[in-house]
Amino acid sequence: MTGSGREERNQRWAHSRRRWDAGYGVKSLSSIARVVDFFEERRGKLYGFRWRDRSDWKSCAPNFAPGPLDQVLGSGDGVLRDFQLIKRYGAAFAPYMRDIAKPVAGSVRVAVGGVEAASTRFEIDATKGVVRFASTHVPPPRAVVTAGFVFDAPARFDTDYLEIDLAAFEAGEIPKIPLIEIIP
């Protein structure tokens, strides 16, 4: 805000970056041991992993199953074989396109020109989120390529230590386990 009361804004990041707290619900000693084991294996912040964000994990609305027409990936030109999985947020004002880098294996359904493609006609790079059509099944010019899928977010711990509370007998908790999205 300026001195006159007007506002000036800029966008420092091209993409949003999600954060989560996975600590809620970790209350038994066996759950604490599993979290500590996973945390130590990842060396705290060092190594990333797949995280299922229960508020945003499908190409469609939460109460529906993903279908092959959920998200528009692009249009064929008769040559292009690779299409990045994306999820569109919003519609009219300023839609945001999020690249999906970690689709869940076996969940991706693809359609070309509104007709679902057999899974033998394409393959999925599950580490980058790219749909690659077989050379004999390249989408023809102006054919809209769409997809539906389940996905995970690439994430890492956002701390190098865990605060563990063992105040109760045979029980305890980890009140906060901060996670942050890794931008692909």
Image (cartoon, rainbow, N blue to C red):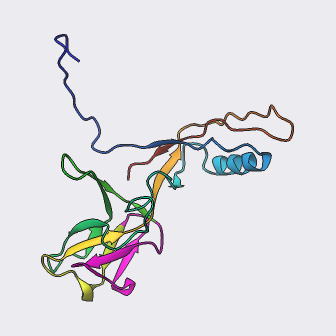
Q: For residue 60, which quarter of the picture?
A: bottom left
Q: Position of residue 55 (x, y in %)?
A: 47, 51
Q: Position of residue 121 (x, y in %)?
A: 33, 85
Magenta highlight on residue 121: yes
Residue at figure coordinates x 13%, y 75% from the top left: 142
Residue farthest front in this picture: 63
Please determine whether, in this image, residue 163 is positioned above or below residue 99: above
Residue farthest right in this picture: 169
Total numbered labels: 0
Pick the front one: 132 or 66: 66
Q: Position of residue 110 (x, y in %)?
A: 33, 76
Q: For residue 133, which quarter of the picture?
A: bottom left
Pick the front one: 73 or 37: 73
Please determine whether, in this image, residue 69 is positioned above or below residue 184: below
Residue at figure coordinates x 23%, y 50% from the top left: 95
Pick the front one: 149 or 99: 149
Magenta highlight on residue 60: no
Please determine whether, in this image, residue 21 is positioned above or below residue 145: above
Q: What span is in magenta?
A: 104-129
Residue at figure coordinates x 59%, y 43% from the top left: 44
Residue farthest top in this picture: 3
Position of the N terminus, as image quadrant, is: top left
Residue at figure coordinates x 37%, y 72% from the top left: 67
Classify residue 102 as left or right of residue 45: left
